[in-house]
Amino acid sequence: MKLGVFLPVSGRAAGPEVLTDAARSAEAQGWDAVWSADRVVTPWRIDTEYPYAEDAAFIVPPDRPFLDSMTCLAYLAGRTERIQLGISVLVLPYRHPLYWARVAASVDLLAGGRLIMGVGVGWMREEFAAQNVPFEARGRMTDEQLEILGKLWSEESISFEGEHYRFHDLSFVPKRKLPIWVGGEGKAARRRTARYGDAWFPYYVRITPEELRARHEEVRAMARELGRDPDAVALTACAAVQLTPDTVRQEPDRLRGTPEQVVEAIQAYERAGVEHLALQFMVPKWPERKEQIARFAEEALPALRR
């Protein structure tokens, strides 16, 4: 299993020195990837429930910086050498596909083929409203974008006529076959993965390895029905992690405890078929989070590499 760690792209510490240190430290510590989150605007009032926290409250206050995801990865492409650069996840309906695909292809080219494109439909109604993007159409818009992406990578003269996007006889170079990891936890996301994705990339607040494997089997079955090789659709995931100084009661649906306990929990996900786990250390302040990441790298990564 490969392991990634989320970057500090939001919060008071977010800036060039911290990002450079975080990415270079992760590379030196032996992580396989660094991951950036995506946000365009943060409303002062958010009534939409946040699906990636146990209390359903969005974790970044509106008065804190939140840097652009792709810009951060482009910046780090020139400040790292080997580590993969991932986005979890780019909300496709917020951007025109011809624009973001050009940016992504450029970042991947400049990074020497290290970009992982996590993509999703988004969740915050207020952010959609601020950009005049129809929330209820976000799934259909995303499907059209992923269909367009296949054309951009493979066709010389590209045309598309859809409900939301229309263009004719375009050139798109450079062509980069980026790995597309489809985020989302519901059945629609699994269907989208089966049709378009190289990996299913959910972020469940709490889920057991057995439950995750069962839902990935649904993805594989859908891929088979669509005429795709089910083995071509990997199982990857994001997960929150919290290191504790002392042993805690083991819970099979979350990553929490001493490094030894977290290693055991991660190994269960590896046995369930997870090929890449992107870890988000749930510590609000960057200095303390940096300490947890370093502790994990020192005490847990070696055991997971055996």
Image: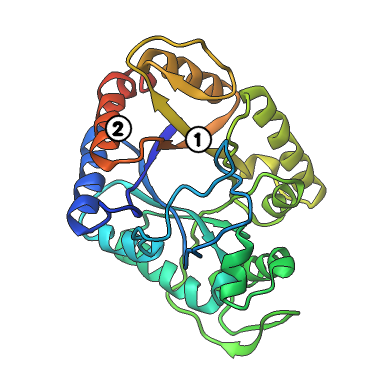
In the image, residue 212 sits, relative to residue 171, either above or below, namely above
Labelled disc at residue 293: 2
For the point 32% across and 36% down, the residue is 31
- Residue 149 appears in the figure: no
Hey, what amino acid is under mark 2?
Ile
For the point 27% across and 55% down, the residue is 14
Front one among 297 and 2: 297
Q: Which residue is mark 1?
A: 239
Front one among 56 and 3: 56
In the picture, residue 210 is in which quadrant? top right
For the point 24% across and 45% down, the residue is 22
In the image, residue 96 sits, relative to residue 292, either above or below, namely below
Task: Give residue 199's position: percent from left, percent from top.
Answer: 59, 46
Task: Give residue 45's position: percent from left, percent from top.
Answer: 54, 61
Contact between labelled residues 2 and 1, with CB atoms less than 8 Å apart: no
Q: How many marks?
A: 2
Mark 2, secondary structure of its residue = helix
Which quadrant of the rendered structure holds the C terminus? top left
Colour scheme: rainbow
- Residue 273 appears in the figure: yes
In the displayed orientation, state which residue is furthest to the right: 225
Q: CA distance from mark 1 to mark 2?
A: 14 Å
Mark 1, secondary structure of its residue = strand
Sequence-first tag of 1 and 2: 1
Task: Give residue 87's position: percent from left, percent from top.
Answer: 45, 54
Hey, what amino acid is under mark 1?
Ala
